[in-house]
Each structure stands twice: as structure tokens, then as C-alpha cells.
Amino acid sequence: MRYPVTYTRLFARELRLDPTQLSELLSGTCIHPDELLQLKPSLSLDEQLSVVHNAIRLADLPTFALEVASRLSLAAHGPLGTLLFASKNLNQAWNGLARYYMLRLPLIELSVHYHDTSFELFLRPKKNCDDVMIFIMECLMLTIQRGIELVLGRKLTEARFEFGYPAPDYAHRYTQFFNSPCVFSASGFRMMMPLTLLDQQNLFHDERMYQQALEQCEQLLTQIRVTESSISWQDRVRAVLREHSGRLWTGNEIANYFQISGRTLIRHLRAEQTSYQTILDQELARLAVEYLQMPRHTVESTAFTLGYRDATAFRRAFHRWFGMSPSSYLKQITADCQH
């Protein structure tokens, strides 16, 4: 899937970049600075993440994500933003977000939960919370608050925002942006608020605009599904493993990622004459050889980088892949090179 350069333009504007810095922002992408103002350019997911990483470095400001999100309009999120803006009430907005969130949030799984007296929006990142993911989660949480406040016509003070990472050094600054309590080191990422707020009428509701946005979102979702259906299941699995290197996924976790059962994943891969374990072993073996040949990596650091809890388990796996220990493999590679 390709993503528009809307957010990249926003970063450039917020940072007031000169031509040299703009090139730095676009480092790791196929976009030239002169193309940024055109409508056609788009970014892959990896390129989008590179831009976020570059923006964080160029900003050198702990609260940069919150500053950006505080000035980000719903219109910046394309048809999905319009759908939320034009919804009849918050309940309709959340249902739309739950169906179409992947149009703008590919690295996050989102679900809504209704309790007796409260409503919960649960968000699960698909990557570990490094600086880039923390940036994304901060932007997302604050955007959620601002969207709710747009409908309510006032500050949202009765909610609760939970963050699944330890309080950052600038945690005290969150109160400048969030109007409800924020909790860190939580078991996950959640926004909880009273159930009674869901039915409050949105003063900006526009049924015609909502239906147009709904149609556009559905068309985009269909395009994604058609594209994905043309990709083999083994390539989909490899893409996930490579995107999340350093995590040892189980077959059921991979199946959950694709929102299918473990048996269905097994059936898909069997039809392609392979298995999840075979694909996992191939990817781990490839990375193991790559890391071991780097001067700074030892057997222990390679094991840790691949996601193993100890080097012993890694050595056993390596022997299964290559029929020899990591040290013997390296000696053989060295001998081959000398000849």
C-alpha cells in the first residue's frame, strides 16, 4: 500500500526546513524535494517510517509529536478524516474508524469495546515502541482527543488515556495537550470515556459529506484487499517477519495479525507447498548469517537481536539450519574466502 505525502508536507512546514534539511527529511525515500508539492508522489510504509524518524531527528524537540498533532486537522487524514468529521455522533465515528483505520494506521490494530458505563478504544501497535512508534501513538492519542472535542464543542475532561510505555522525561508536558488524565506503563494503549458521550449529536454532521466519504473509504479498502489478494501468503508472512525483525512470532500470532485462524493460515501455506516454520527458519537463518558476518556481532548478540532469550536456543536452531555450530560456520566461510 502507498501513502500520500500529506504528513511529510506537514513536517516540512512545522520544521520550516531549508532545501538541505528538506533533503534530510526525505532521506530513505524515492521522493525528490521538488516533487513534494505535487499531488502524485506517494510513500511506501518503510519510506513513511523513515520520514518520521528523520523528522524526529531534525526537530530535536521532545514534544514534537504533540505539537504537530495539536495543529493537525481531520482533513489531513483524507476520506477517513472527513468520515469522522461528518459523522452523526461519536458512536458512528468510532464504528467508521474501526472499519477503515488501516487506510491511515497500518502499524496499529484498533478495536472498540462497550462496557456497562464506559466506552473503550483499544489500540495495539504492531511494532515495538521505539521513538517512531511513540511519536505515532502520541499523535494518534491527541488526534483522538481533538476529534472528540470537536463533536462535544468543549474540552474532554472525563476520559482516561493509557500509554503502554514508561513515562518519558517530558511526561509533565502532557498536561499542556491532554485535558484528561494520562497513565503510563499501562498494559496497552487505551482511551476510555463515559458511554453517555457516544450519542451526543455532532453539530458538524453532514449526511451527504458522510456518505461521499464512506464511499471513498470503501473504494480504498477494496483496492487494498485486491492488492493483497494478488500476493502469495508466504510473501505476506515474510513481509511481516522482516518488518518486525527481532520478534519471534508464533504461527497463531501471525494468523491473528492477518485476522484469520491458525488453521486457515496453515491451509493457505500448505496450498503453496510450504509451512510457517519453514518460512520462519529461512528468515532467521538468513539474518543469522548476515549478523554473524558483521564484526560487531557475537553469537550472543546475534541471538538477542533475532529475538532468542538465550544463546543456547539460538545455537540449537543454527545447527538445525546448517548442520553445524555458528563458530564452525564462520570458520568455513573464512576458509572459503582465503581460497
Image (cartoon, rainbow, N blue to C red):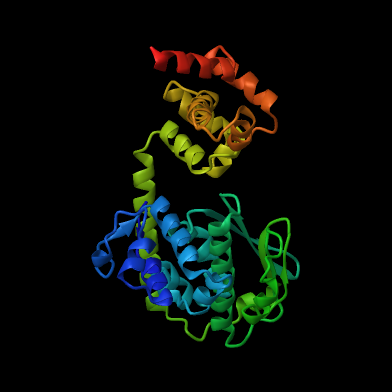
- Asked whether 140 or 313 is in front, the reply is 313
Q: Is residue 201 visible?
A: no
Q: How many numbered dots are placed on residues in this image?
A: 0
Q: Please, which residue is most extreme toward the front here?
A: 338
- Asked whether 275 or 174 is in front, the reply is 174
- Percent position of residue 14, x then y: 43, 76
User: Height in image: 258 above or below 140?
Assistant: above
- Percent position of residue 315, x then y: 63, 21
- Asked whether 67 or 59 is in front, the reply is 59
- Percent position of residue 193, x then y: 69, 73
- Percent position of residue 140, x then y: 55, 67
Residue at coordinates 47% horizontally, 23% vertically from top-left?
270
Specify the quadrant that holds the C terminus.
top left
Q: Is residue 19 visible?
A: yes
Residue at coordinates 66% horizontally, 75% vertically from top-left?
174
Residue at coordinates 69% horizontally, 81% vertically from top-left?
157
User: Height in image: 177 above or below 8?
Assistant: below
Compared across the picture, whether 107 is left or right of 218 comes to right
Compared across the picture, whether 199 is left or right of 88 comes to right
Res 10 quadrant in image = bottom left
Compared across the picture, whether 113 is left or right of 147 comes to right
Residue at coordinates 59% horizontally, 75% vertically from top-left?
145
